Amino acid sequence: MRIDKFLWCTRYFKTRNVATNAVKNGHVRINGNVVKPSREVYPMDEIILRKNQIDYQLTVMDIPKSRVGAKLVDLYRKDTTPKEAFEHNELQKYAKSHYRKKGLGRPTKKDRRDIDDYLDESE
């Protein structure tokens, strides 16, 4: 089975086209190598998938016939992603919301002056 179809079948991507674009952009590696969307996937292949700034690490257990339900995904892959990857993503969310509340837009002139004053004082 093709790698883009496998990622779509195991519900990592909503559509096959999105999966194909992710593979084309180099966000997917099989056994450490960047691959094309037409690359075949075999059992026991190690896949590293970069999605939402998280590097998912997967091991292919079996090849599905078609797209599977969410409860059956674990029959076809083993997720070996370290917990630190998810924790790092949570910390990034908190760092973004600390500076500016979501939806407030670009900094105003006053915000910009405050930033410049802060940077001048630190130097």
Image (cartoon, grey):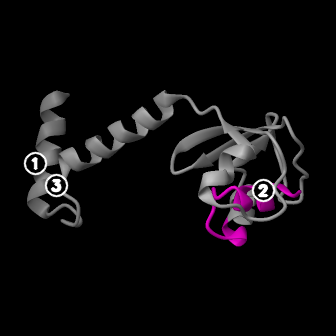
Q: Which residues are magenta?
A: 1-18
Q: CA distance from mark 1 to mark 3?
A: 5 Å
Q: Quadrant of the N terminus?
A: bottom right
Label 1 is placed on what type of residue? Answer: Asp
User: Residue shown at 28%/47% (left/top)?
Assistant: 96
Considering the numbered disc 1 on the image, is that residue within a helix, a strand or a loop?
A: helix
Residue picked out by circle 1: 114
Considering the numbered disc 2 on the image, is that residue within a helix, a strand or a loop?
A: helix
Looking at the rendered structure, the number of numbered marks drawn on it comes to 3
Label 2 is placed on what type of residue? Answer: Phe
Label 3 near label 1: C-beta < 8 Å?
yes
Q: CA distance from mark 2 to mark 3?
A: 47 Å
Q: Nearer the viewer, mark 2 or mark 3?
A: 2
Q: Quadrant of the C terminus?
A: top left
Foreground residue, 43 or 102? Answer: 43
Please provide percent x and percent y for residue 24: 76, 59
Q: Indicate yes or no whether the magenta region holds residue 26.
A: no
Foreground residue, 51 or 79? Answer: 79
Q: Indicate yes or no whether the magenta region holds residue 6.
A: yes
Please provide percent x and percent y for residue 104: 18, 65
What label sits on residue 6 in the rendered view? 2
What label sits on residue 112 in the rendered view? 3
Q: Nearer the viewer, mark 1 or mark 2?
A: 2
User: Residue shown at 50%/33% (left/top)?
Assistant: 85
The answer to which quarter of the image holds residue 46 is: top right
Considering the numbered disc 3 on the image, is that residue within a helix, a strand or a loop?
A: helix
